[in-house]
Amino acid sequence: EAESPDSPAATPVEAAPAAASSGVPERDTEYKCSVALRLNAMIKKQTDFADAALYKSPLDVANAIAAKLAEYPETEGVVDKVEVVPPGFINFRVATSFLVRELRNIAGTGKVAPPAEVKPVKVVIDFSSPNIAKEMHVGHLRSTIIGESISRILEFCGFDVARTNHVGDWGTQFGMLIAHLKDEHPNFVDNPPNISDLQAFYRAAKARFDAEPDFTQRAYSEVVALQSRSEESLKAWNLICEVSRVEFQRIYDRLQVTTHEKGESFYHDQLADTVELIKERIPLVGTFTSGEDEDAEAIKERRDAFAAEVAAQTSLDNSVLAEDNGALCFWIVNPREPNAPPKPLIVQKADGGYTYATTDFAALKYRLDVEKADWILYVVDSGQASHLECIYKGGQHMGLFSADDKRVEHVGFGVVVGEDGKKFKTRSGDVVRLVDLLDTAVEGAEKLVRSKLDERLAKIDEQLAAGELTEEEAAAAREAESMDDAEIRKASDAIGHGCIKYADLRCNRLNNYMFSFERMLDTRGNTAVYLLYAYARMCSILRVGTERLSSVLDVDAFFAASAATGAADLILTHPSEQRLAFTIARFAEEIEYVLETLLPSRLCELLYDLSTAFSEFYHHCKVVDLDDIEVSKSRLLIVRAALTMMASTFDLLGVEYVGRL
Ligand code: ARG
């Protein structure tokens, strides 16, 4: 049965109430599968199913599946018990030998492996894509963070990924910007000005555009000059783009994001051909012209009738062209809303100019034909869903690709809202500047790092005062805790930027997302701060454990040997060891799930599960016990596997981590 992305056939069971003896859930390495319940419901609906009598209840279906499974050798060594539970669940217990193998690989190699069965096709991922001269806002921040993470995940899985920044660097806004530049800096060619605040420059130009008819006219002629590529216009255009580019890059550097610019202007000289191709492949079904002295009312009435006629000829299988007072419109049914009226996308304006949509058709063609993409992702806010779906459908009708052999999809996301639930703005109502946002987060992080450090130092003083530590021990403890300014800076950067990224990634991207510094810097719950501290603690557990075991064993050689030969045996006997192992081993399956759904939030859930499973393990199991070297070796390997998985997952999310906090 095909699975809808949100209901995987097998999901790990919810933690059951703690078992009395160990304090950890008993069924901690099981998958509970509900497919028999759904199959039974389907069978009941089917009137012509000959064997229906055999599958009267979900339990019948579950038993049949469980019996059949025994014939499949693939499950051997992976599942060691299949159990049918009323009303029709099939529970699979993962074999300990499987967990041992997985963990040994991860701990031994210090790496997690990507899924083996992925076909490494070419992927073009369009993300970030801010607009020149306009502020890169929180929406673009979401695209940047989500796009970076998905790129990393795809690269990890072996895909050939082209990270593409579809910057809005062409369009009518340049007319007024160039006109204003010429007025303010007449000598700009020889003596390029340093525009530090492009936003202010944009606002000033816009104000004049709205208020001075003279200026408006000049702005229009500047657009024409730019489109005919006059040398002076191109210089002005470049100068303005460069200012934005530097600002964007500053954000990318801080967030450790890589994306390659191929902005709208890149496709400019392909637009005429694109429109020709559209005309060649899509039938023109009508032309509307309003009469010279026809009044507005009459025009509207006629145009509505015309539009209704065109719409009637447009369907999911058939897009059409219609001309409206010289503008060429591409009528397309959005496949996600097949019953909604079709939308006309203007692909050429009456003055001959092209649009955002024309550029998207050209870019789609380029990505398919020149870049040879098998898979194209658009990480763009959900507000553009209908536009993009129409581009994909129109592209298919133009014969650019077939959905049977290409995956062309929108990776949408919700809007960012403030704590009042309204669109995210500053107190004065302005768009929030990204740099300010990052600075605030890093400042908050630094405060947190310093206060946590102070807490730990105060604790040592307390212990000294209470006589629990000697003067010497206290000095050593202080030394071990101390962080210099550079370390604090590095930690604050990691936490500050990490918390912004993580807060975004951890919620299902399709939902709106509430921006709250307070929440993202919370030390409890599924936040970057909590996880980064958990990670640092695990590092210190590994450090201390390694040091203790070093008195009887060459630990590095032991790790190396376990990687090379797989000889070191893991002993997974305690339920909390098994649960931790199970959580670590889930990594592979979660990655496959993310490839299918493009929801990095799943990896965030996994990280949180891991840190809870680890705490439980640490609570119940002494890592190094010099009286039992075999168990200590095994546990050190488990810790190493957990750390490896955690670090790799942080990497895939683009969250930087530090070993000491
Ligand atoms: N620059 C656009 C915006 O800010 C996003 C571009 C997305 N990519 C695309 N191929 N349309 O809204």
Image (tube, rainbow, N blue to C red):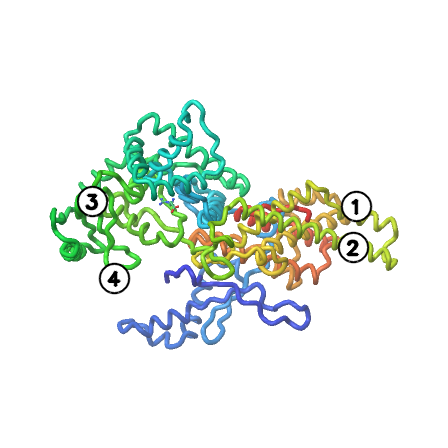
Q: Position of residue 464 (x, y in %)?
A: 85, 55
Q: Is residue 319 left or right of residue 160?
A: left
Query: Distance of mark 4 from mark 1, alpha carbons?
Result: 69 Å
Query: Distance of mark 1 from mark 2, alpha carbons?
Result: 13 Å
Q: Is residue 264 left or right of residue 562?
A: left
Q: Assign the N terminus to one quadrant of the image.
A: bottom left
Looking at this view, is 542 or 536 the one in front? Answer: 536
Kind of residue indicated by mark 1: Glu
Which mark identifies residue 458? 2
Residue at (48%, 31%) from the top-left corner? 194
Kind of residue indicated by mark 4: Asn
Compare marks 1 and 2 and give the one earlier in the sequence. 2
What secondary structure is found at the residue carrying circle 1? helix
- Quadrant of res 100: bottom right
Query: Distance of mark 2 from mark 4, alpha carbons?
Result: 66 Å
Label 2: few (<14), some (14–19) or many (≥20) C-alpha neighbours in 10 Å: few
Can you see residue 625?
yes
Q: Which residue is mark 4?
A: 339
Compare marks 4 and 3 and give the one earlier in the sequence. 3
What secondary structure is found at the residue carrying circle 2? helix
Q: Which residue is mark 3?
A: 328
Q: Position of residue 603 (x, y in %)?
A: 52, 54
